[in-house]
Image (cartoon, helix red, strand yellow):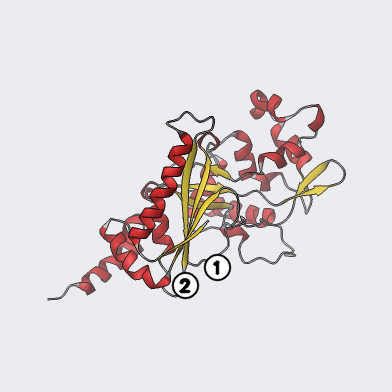
Amino acid sequence: MIKEIETIEEFLNESFKIQEDIDTYNNGWKANHHKGLSFRGQASKQYELIPSIGRDRMFSCDISILDQERNLIEMAKYKLPHIFRSDLLPIDLLSLLQHYGIPTRLLDVTLNPLVALYFASINDSEDGEVFAFEYNDSDRANYPVINAIAESYKFAIGTFHALSLFFKDVIEQPYFAEQRSLFINESNKGGGRWIKDCCQDLIFVNATEQIERQKLQKGFYILFPNEIEKYGDDDFCFNKIIKPIDKNNRQIKERIIVKKEGKPEIRKKLEFLGISEATLFSDNIDIVCKNIVEQCKRIRF
């Protein structure tokens, strides 16, 4: 469903309707699978839903995302070992990299629809877009296999990344011993099909709140595996690319188009409600100082 809005009041009404639908489904926690909502705002409705490491790439690009990712992460750990520590869980490491501007396979989402609206309203030359995603609350957890996917670059060699080899290298290690019986059966001995099946739905993940803006933005993430394609008769493999989420994906409950004409007034009212660049990035000294200057310029003596 697609809605168009020009005011913050219209946006809030749409957000409340979406939440009411979710509450009706959950029926006071009586549903078998309790659903949650998350939101993402993008400054242009032309933008794809794809994480930063997958953007601006040709389909036939020679370097695999897995190889590029390895280079970025290992260099960051080498240059700043006190920040990108080796003892961090893979999801937590990606989260820190993301917030410091290094491309990752994570896509930011938030629990706060007003935060998403802010990011959708920061470019006055184009219509923005807010996505409302639904997911099962029980799935938003960092299971071992999810952390394995988060660092899948470690288990990829060359240009061929068979999921059966990924399964053997990762899932069959002692770390997964307690869950191994859930991952494999007689019809799926190689484990490749199981990995493919676990990547069918959007993967929502939490990360430890290492820096202040993670708390302020009430954020978590969608984790993107590399594209999976059939290989041979009974196996699958990671391709070199990451594909965007289809905007008609069944987990997108609603798309809200933020008309460019209404963006300045929306930002003004969001600031009144405590949602602005200065509050969402209060741990960034450059941004805070820039906003101090802007506020002083508005003062009339």
- Residue 28 picture location, percent across and down: 42, 31
Local packing at callout 1 (Cα closer than 10 Å; few below 14, some 14-19, many 20+) is: few
- Residue 226 picture location, percent across and down: 68, 51
Disc 1 and disc 2 in contact, CB within 8 angstroms: yes
- Residue 263 picture location, percent across and down: 37, 68
Q: Quadrant of the C terminus?
A: bottom left
Q: Marks 1/2: CA distance?
A: 9 Å
Q: Would residue 296 be found to the left or right of residue 33 on screen?
A: left
Question: Front-most of 67 and 227?
Answer: 227
What is the number of the mark on residue 46?
1
At x 33%, y 59%, the residue is 9
- Residue 118 picture location, percent across and down: 39, 60
What is the number of the mark on residue 126?
2
**Circle 1 sits in a helix, a strand or a loop, which is it?**
loop
- Kindly give the residue lying farthest to the left in the view shown: 301
Residue type at mark 2 is: Glu
Residue 85 shows up from this direction: no
- Kindly give the residue lying farthest to the right in the view shown: 233
Q: Would residue 194 be found to the left or right of residue 283 on screen?
A: right
Local packing at callout 2 (Cα closer than 10 Å; few below 14, some 14-19, many 20+) is: some
